[in-house]
Amino acid sequence: MISAVLIPKLRARFPGRGLRVSSPPSPSAVFPAIHPEVGDIQIYDDGDELTVVAGNFTHGHFSNYDEKLSPEQKASEIAEDVVSFLEALFADEVVLWGSHERCGGWYNIGEDSSSWAKDDKKYVWSGPLS
């Protein structure tokens, strides 16, 4: 499972963030929210991919379909992709919007966001954007 590769990376890169670890079907990893309107980050190990639930807003799938790579190499690359996303998220470089009930998403600060969530309130990890 990818979480066997991911969890040590999360512990090393994000000490002090309150990481909780469990086994499927529960999320493999959870980072508690620092702002209640944002919500927890939950990471599910789906066997061949990781699903990251981005708080109260949306989720994303992290996969690797490169047939030249071994399963171990794929797991390592997927884990690194999730860690990179979390580094940007925790640095308030990722904007979250929407909800699980309708639609939501995220984008990196600096991207053209003119077509994203025009009427939705936007958040970063630390809380609402003004």
Image (cartoon, grey):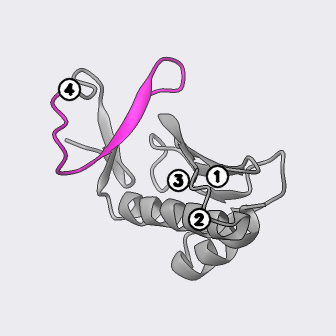
Please provide percent x and percent y for residue 10.
60, 72
Disc number for residue 115: 4
**Secondary structure under badge 4?**
loop
Residue 19 showing in the rendered view: no
Q: Upstream in the sequence, badge 1 or badge 2? A: 1
Q: Is residue 11 magenta?
A: no
Q: Which residue is mark 2?
A: 79
Above-or-below relation of 97 to 118: below
Q: Upstream in the sequence, badge 2 or badge 4? A: 2
Residue 129 showing in the rendered view: yes
Is the N terminus in the top left, top right, bottom left or bottom right quadrant? bottom right
**Secondary structure under badge 1?**
strand
What residue is rendered at 71% in x and 63% in y? 71
Is the C terminus in the top left, top right, bottom left or bottom right quadrant? top left
What residue is rendered at 56% in x and 66% in y? 77
Q: Upstream in the sequence, badge 4 or badge 1? A: 1
Amino acid type indicated by mark 1: Ile
